[in-house]
Amino acid sequence: MSNREDSSAADNYKGVWDSRIGFGQKAALVVVDFMQGYTTEDSPLFAPGVVEAVAQSPTLLNAAREAGAPVLHTNIRYHGPDYLDGGVWVKKAPVMKAMVAGNPYAEFCPEVVPQGDELVITKQYASAFFGTSLAPTLMALGVDTLVLAGCSTSGCIRATAVDGMQHGFRVMVVRECVGDRHPTPHEANLFDIDSKYGDVISVEDAVGYFTAKRHARD
């Protein structure tokens, strides 16, 4: 085995895939799919890491709101009974059929319910950008940086981070405020996002950014 193959992932990527992008001029907080199916123990979608992420997120939400930053949310909704708008995704992941109007699993977690003036973007696929108005909405707001919270890390967060970068946005993923059903894909995808598509930051750093913006505004 070569030294490169024997090294840790961090050592292997060092100096090649470890640059930082940082915040731009204006950030929006985008909270992805914090729905009760991921936090209800008898749900097939239940993900312990999402329970933890939801618990950490009110502090982040409050900081963004107090700073006057745009706060947007996404949810998933399909049209039953045939789920035609779910396409191949629902065939691959039939567990997602819970995401229909009237199913409690498809409702927002109480701790992170959108406020009345906050935009909710409904999507059918993993990325918050795919087939939605998210990109032009952010551009119209003058946003150049996305702060991402939500779930799941290996699914909708990763897809949104990749598409965010590809739409020209700086992507900041808040480590404590994203979660998955198992720590291995969670950590692997945070590593990959941080290496190639954005910056993985702490909730303290994210709150500090929004707090500084609020003070600058005041």
Image (cartoon, rainbow, N blue to C red):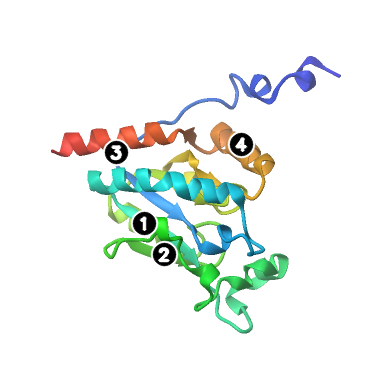
Q: CA distance from mark 4 to mark 2?
A: 26 Å
- Residue 14 placement (x, y as % from top left): 61, 20
Answer few, some or many: residues within 10 Å of disc 1's Cα (few below 14, many 20 plus, some between 14 and 19): many
User: Do tag 1 and tag 2 residues touch (Cβ < 8 Å)?
Assistant: yes
Secondary structure beneath dot 4 equals: helix
Asked whether, in this view, residue 206 is left or right of residue 127, the answer is left
- Residue 163 visible to an observer of this rendering: no
Amino acid bearing label 2: Ile
- Vertical comparison of 14 with 213: above or below: above
Q: Nearer the viewer, mark 4 or mark 1?
A: 1
Is disc 2 placed on a helix, strand or loop? Answer: strand
Residue at x 66%, y 66% (from the top left corner): 89
Gap between marks 4 and 3 measured at Cα:
25 Å
* Mark 4 touches mark 1? (CB < 8 Å): no
Q: Which residue is mark 4?
A: 192
The residue that disc 1 covers is 72
* Gap between marks 1 and 2 measured at Cα: 7 Å
Quadrant where the image shows the C terminus: top left
Residue type at numbered disc 4: Asp
The mark nearer the N terminus, 4 or 1, is 1
The answer to which of marks 1 and 2 sits earlier in the sequence is 1
Residue 210, disc: 3
State the residue at coordinates (57%, 52%).
152
In the displayed image of the protein, which residue is found farthest to the left?
A: 218
Q: Amino acid at mark 3?
A: Phe
Q: Earlier in the sequence, mark 4 or mark 3?
A: 4
Is 184 above or below relative to 119? above
**Quarter of the rendering containing residue 115:** bottom left
**Which residue is tagged 2?**
121
Relative image position of residue 169 (x, y in whole percent): 41, 44
Percent x, y for residue 101? 50, 77
Check the image and report above or below for 12 versus 160.
above
